[in-house]
Amino acid sequence: MERLEKPMRPSRRANDEMRAVSFERGVLRHAEGSCLVKFGDTHVLVAATLEERLPPWLKGQGRGWVTAEYSMLPRATLERTRRESTTGKQSGRTQEIQRLIGRSLRSVTDLVGLGERQITLDCDVIQADGGTRTAAITGAWVALHDCLNWMYQRSMLKTIPLKEHVAAISCGIYEGAPVLDLDYPEDSKAETDANFVMTGSGGIVEIQGTAEKTPFSQDELLSLLGLARKGVNELVELQKLALKA
């Protein structure tokens, strides 16, 4: 635990302290579910769309599908980022992130209970300050919940086919210390950068960890995992509070 007493972070947060997190539901008039999620200065708008169709390879299997698309608006960053649509293809980073979001949401969805339908979560980064994928996953769960509840209220579902919560948080080694929920100044200089996707009951969906400068040890990985559990527990409680609002 000595490593948690290391120097102050640029944001002045404690090493195990997250940024301010908020969820604003129902922000889009036409979407079956929507959420504006904020992790500090990282803001992501998520829209859930229900479609009474499936990818061709899923037809006739008696189950549905949950997928995601991710994009970053041109001025979400300090300098303008060119729209990927103008290049005619998505970047590898974009494809990786949207696949991660889709996997994370499917891990807690009863696809058989959904029926032969597809729900797409569109995650658009309005403002980026580190942790856009983790914010997208956490906010997408709220939008997905509201979409499924919209279906339930219209007798399209017998029950809401969500098995539990899912949320994601970043952790890293910054100036030799494990820290929780990296913003951009930390993320850009971290010795180790990791993203953890976990369920409300503590199950691990996915871990992405990279040594940016020097390899990290097993003990450091366990320290990051401990921070991630703390962060995800807090996020799940905030998701629950948002649903009661």
Image (cartoon, rainbow, N blue to C red):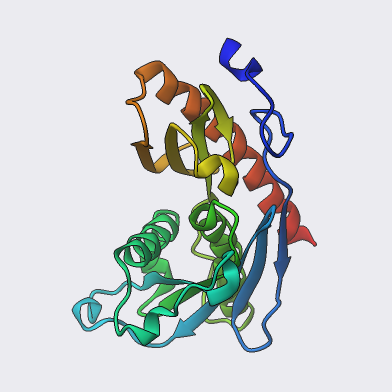
Viewer-closest of 24 and 83 = 83
Q: Is residue 74 left or right of residue 238?
A: left
Where residue 99 appears, x then y in whole percent? Answer: 34, 63
Residue 40 appears anywhere in the view: yes
Q: Is residue 70 above or below residue 220?
A: below
Viewer-closest of 243 and 196 = 196
Q: Is residue 213 left or right of residue 70?
A: left
Viewer-closest of 117 and 41 = 41
The quadrant the C terminus occupies is bottom right
Quarter of the view holding residue 175: top right
Residue placed at 35% from the left, 38% from the top?
Answer: 210
Viewer-closest of 229 and 96 = 96
The quadrant the N terminus occupies is top right
- In the displayed image of the protein, which residue is found farthest to the right? 245
Q: Is residue 146 above or below residue 219?
A: below
Residue placed at 70% from the left, 29% from the top?
Answer: 14
Where residue 70 appears, x then y in whole percent? Answer: 45, 70
